[in-house]
Image (tube, grey):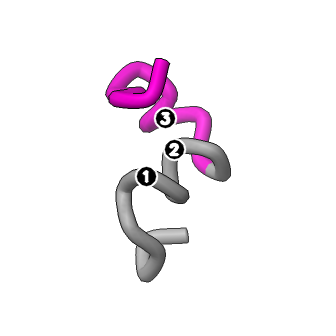
Amino acid sequence: ATSLPRRIDTHHTPSKQEERPES
């Protein structure tokens, strides 16, 4: 998931859920 861009990473990793720019 780290290899994928932040936009997609947010949908996979719950840790980045807080940094959801698409929210």
Q: Which residue is mark 1?
A: 7
Answer above or below: position of 23 versus 20.
above
- Type of amino acid at the residue the image marks with label 3: Ser
Span shown in magenta: 13-23
At mark 3, the secondary structure is helix
Query: Residue at 34% of width from left, 29% of height from top?
Result: 21
What is the x, y in percent for residue 22? 44, 29
User: Horizontal placement of 8 versus 18: left or right?
Assistant: right
- The answer to whether marks 3 and 2 mark residues whose Cβ atoms lie closer than 8 Å is no
- Quick one: which residue is furthest to the front in this view? 22
Answer above or below: position of 4 versus 7.
below
What is the x, y in percent for residue 6? 37, 56
Front tag of 2 and 1? 1
Q: Which mark is residue 10?
A: 2
| Separation of residues labelled 3 and 2 (CA atoms) | 8 Å
Mark 3 vs 2, N-terminal side: 2
Q: Residues within 10 Å of mark 1 (few under 14, many from 20)?
A: few
- The answer to whether marks 2 and 1 mark residues whose Cβ atoms lie closer than 8 Å is yes
| Separation of residues labelled 1 and 3 (CA atoms) | 13 Å
- Type of amino acid at the residue the image marks with label 1: Arg
User: Horizontal placement of 17 versus 6: left or right?
Assistant: right
Residue 17 among those drawn in magenta: yes
Query: Residue at 48% of width from left, 18% of height from top?
Result: 23
Q: Nearer the viewer, residue 4 or 22?
A: 22
What is the x, y in percent for residue 5? 38, 68
At mark 1, the secondary structure is helix
Mark 1 vs 3, N-terminal side: 1
Front tag of 3 and 2? 2
Q: In which quadrant of the rendered image does the N terminus lie?
A: bottom right
Q: Which residue is mark 3?
A: 15
At mark 2, the secondary structure is helix
